Image (spheres, rainbow, N blue to C red):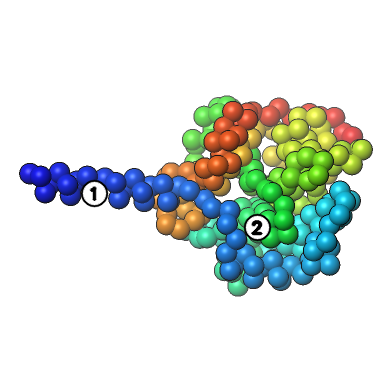
Amino acid sequence: MKKTKFFLGISFIGFLYYLLISMGVSKSINEDDKYITKLLNVDKECLKMNSYEQELKCIKTIQESQLNLIKGGVCRGKYINLGSKEVIKVNTACCFDRSRITEQALQIYGFKVRHVFLNETSKRGYFNLLIPNTISHAASEVLTSKGWLGVDSNEPFVLLDENNYPNTFEKAISNGVINSYSKTAIYKKPMTYVIGLYSRHGAFFEPYFPYLPEINFYDFFRNLFNIRIINPSNNIN
């Protein structure tokens, strides 16, 4: 009986450990990140930054370089590792791979970043996060010397207002700044804004645990009370 309890206890602990490892997304830099960032060829713009303007130049160059590096726009699907060398081999990526590449490259050049998950939510509110295959978008925010700046993954824009100040996606969607940059339909509908959520299905990072979310625990729980539904503005700046 004692052996059985011991075995069950060890099995349960092992299961919890696997669960946490499967759900947790690290932002640590790996060899694939270094390889892809080198291909971006942005040292000239990013190695020495001494001003806000130079920060913006680096951020924009990284964004444009990843868009030019990977030509295809078809998503790689599930059971992959976001931002891995496989992206280069297949030469196609959509928002979730592109945002990961952008974030890792920005970190290599000294920026703090956070992953942004946007989920269209016009009918069910927050519950739409639990519905598979609802319209969503992955993007990034980077901390500049003047605050957090939204960086899109599929289109070549960063969220600067008319005074060249940074906006988060939450702020730019609600105040209409984003309308000056993009006509994409998802930005015209109410959506849930979540920081640190990479997937709702558990199939973007090994080891996989299907149907469970993949999150960066630090970013997600630090910004747990910043999760909100954004109502878009129709104002055009």
Rounded to the nearest angstrom, the CA distance separating label 2 from label 1 is: 36 Å
Residue 133 in percent (x, y) is at 53, 43
**Residue 200's disc number:** none
Residue 111 in percent (x, y) is at 72, 52
Residue 60 in percent (x, y) is at 81, 55
Q: Residue at x 42, y 54 (%)?
A: 208
Q: Residue furthest toward the right?
A: 163
Which residue is nearer to you in this view: 234 or 4?
Answer: 4
Q: Quadrant of the N terminus?
A: top left
Circle nearer the viewer, 2 or 1? 1
Q: Quadrant of the C terminus?
A: top right
Q: Residue at x 80, y 63 (%)?
A: 47
Q: Amino acid at mark 1?
A: Ile
Q: Residue at x 42, y 57 (%)?
A: 207
Q: Is any atom of residue 52 visible in this view?
A: yes
Q: Amino acid at mark 2?
A: Gln
Image height check: is 180 above or below 7? Answer: above
* In the image: residue 61, left or right of residue 90: right
Q: Are marks 2 and 1 in contact (CB under 8 Å)?
A: no
* In the image: residue 212, left or right of residue 42: left
Residue 32 in percent (x, y) is at 59, 67
Q: Secondary structure at mark 2?
A: helix
* In the image: residue 197, left or right of residue 177: left
The residue under label 1 is 10
Q: Residue furthest toward the left?
A: 1
Q: Is any atom of residue 210 visible in this view?
A: no
Task: Examine the image and state in which quarter residue 122 appears.
Answer: top right
Task: Examine the image and state in which quarter residue 5 appears.
Answer: top left
For label 1, count other residues whose C-alpha is less than 10 Å away and answer few (under 14), some (14-19) or many (20+). Answer: few
The residue under label 2 is 104
